[in-house]
Amino acid sequence: MARTQGSHSDLTRPRVRAAAQSLFAQRGYAAVSMRQIASKVGVQAGALYNYTPDKQTLLFDLMKQHMDELLAALDAREPAGGPIAALEAFTRFHIGFHLERPDAVFIAYMELRNLSEAHFKQIEQLRGQYESALADILRAGQNADVFHIADVRVTTRALVAMLTGVTTWYRDSGTLSRDQVEDVYWHMVRGAVGAG
């Protein structure tokens, strides 16, 4: 079947990913067909297979791209001093990064159940790397006796869940600015770790 006019690999591949991300976030992975993705991109359904072998791989690629970008952005930050400063920097980083990508965040958390076992293990390993960065901060604060928490692992997961939740309700048109939201969340995080 001939390629749709104007369809070039360097241009179409990102459009396929963007269309899939938008549709998966709006309707859920299970409810979206390759035909619907193709229609949104403006190519014939068969042409999608030039860019991805199947819908499962497309879902995995979106999740992996999100995690790779998150880890790269985390690594690129300047070091932030002691445990309290480091925890505040992590809190503000997490909120800022995720608010820019609500569709990617929704998919990364809500569609894990639709990954194959092999793909799930890879994403889980990347998530573990990210959570380890926070766990290291919490452990350092615990060792310095500035954080008072019962379990580092549980606290890590609880904080990530709380911080990520901001993407479900925050809107730029709301009453709080992003900076104000970061301030409120930092106050909650500080209280959650017993830092006063």
Image (cartoon, helix red, strand yellow):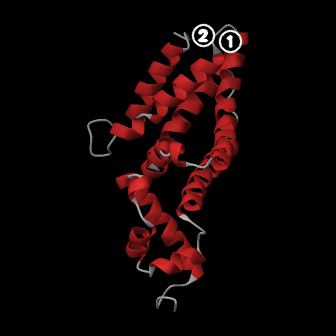
Q: CA distance from mark 1 to mark 2?
A: 7 Å
Three-letter code, disc 2: Ile
Is 143 drawn above or below residue 126 in the view shown? Answer: above
Looking at the image, can residue 159 be seen? yes
- In the rendered image, residue 49, in percent from the top left (x then y), is placed at 56, 75
Q: Residues within 10 Å of mark 2 (few under 14, many from 20)?
A: some
Vertical relation: 163 (above or below) 34: above
Going by the numbered disc 1, the residue's amino acid type is Gln
What is the quadrant of residue 89 in the picture?
top right
* Vertical side of 186 occupied by 47: above or below: below
- Is any part of residue 177 visible from this angle? no
Q: Which residue, given by chain and number where applicable, does mark 1 sit on?
A: 142
Residues tagged 1 and 2 counted as in contact (Cβ below 8 A): yes
The residue under the point 32% across, 43% down is 171
Q: Nearer the viewer, residue 63 or 163?
A: 63
Judging by the rendered image, the residue that carries numbered circle 2 is 149
